[in-house]
Amino acid sequence: MQVRKINSAEYYIILFNSKNHAIHLNYLLEKKGYRKFQLISTPCRLSKGCSYSLKFNKLSDLEYLKRENKNLSQLVNGIYEVQRIKGKKTYKKLHYVI
């Protein structure tokens, strides 16, 4: 598996109801050649227990996710904007309609 690093002062993450949903969707995206997403461990501040999220740079990249899974809204637990302010990460929940 090729690891893609998304380095930016601002990015987005999408949390799923289960880690299986995140892994499966990431697999589908990789298989189709989408390289805009990175599978990451969900930050502890946002989720209890072991979970995965998808990290991406532009909010418009959610359109790729919608194309790959028509039931995306049922799988998603939240979308967050992540910013680094004065060396600390801040998480802002977005009210984005999927």
Image (tube, rainbow, N blue to C red):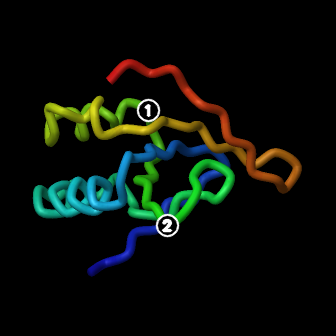
Circle 2: residue type = Cys
Q: Which residue is mark 1?
A: 59
Circle 1: residue type = Leu
In this picture, is 7 found above or below 75? Answer: below
Residue 84 place in picture, x, y as percent: 75, 49
Mark 2 neighbour density, 10 Å: few (under 14) some (14–19) many (20 or more): few
Residue 93 place in picture, x, y as percent: 60, 31
Q: Which residue is mark 2?
A: 50
Along the horizontal axis of the image, is 62 left or right of 78? Answer: left
Q: Choose top left, top right, bottom left or bottom right for residue 22.
A: bottom left
Q: Residue at x 61, y 48 (%)?
A: 46
Q: Are marks 1 and 2 in contact (CB under 8 Å)?
A: no
In what element is the residue under mark 1?
helix
N-terminal-most mark, 1 or 2: 2
Residue 13 place in picture, x, y as percent: 49, 46
Q: Residue at x 20, y 63 (%)?
A: 27
Mark 1 or 2: in front is 2
Q: Residue at x 27, y 81 (%)?
A: 1
Mark 1 neighbour density, 10 Å: few (under 14) some (14–19) many (20 or more): some
Point out the image quarter for the C terminus: top left
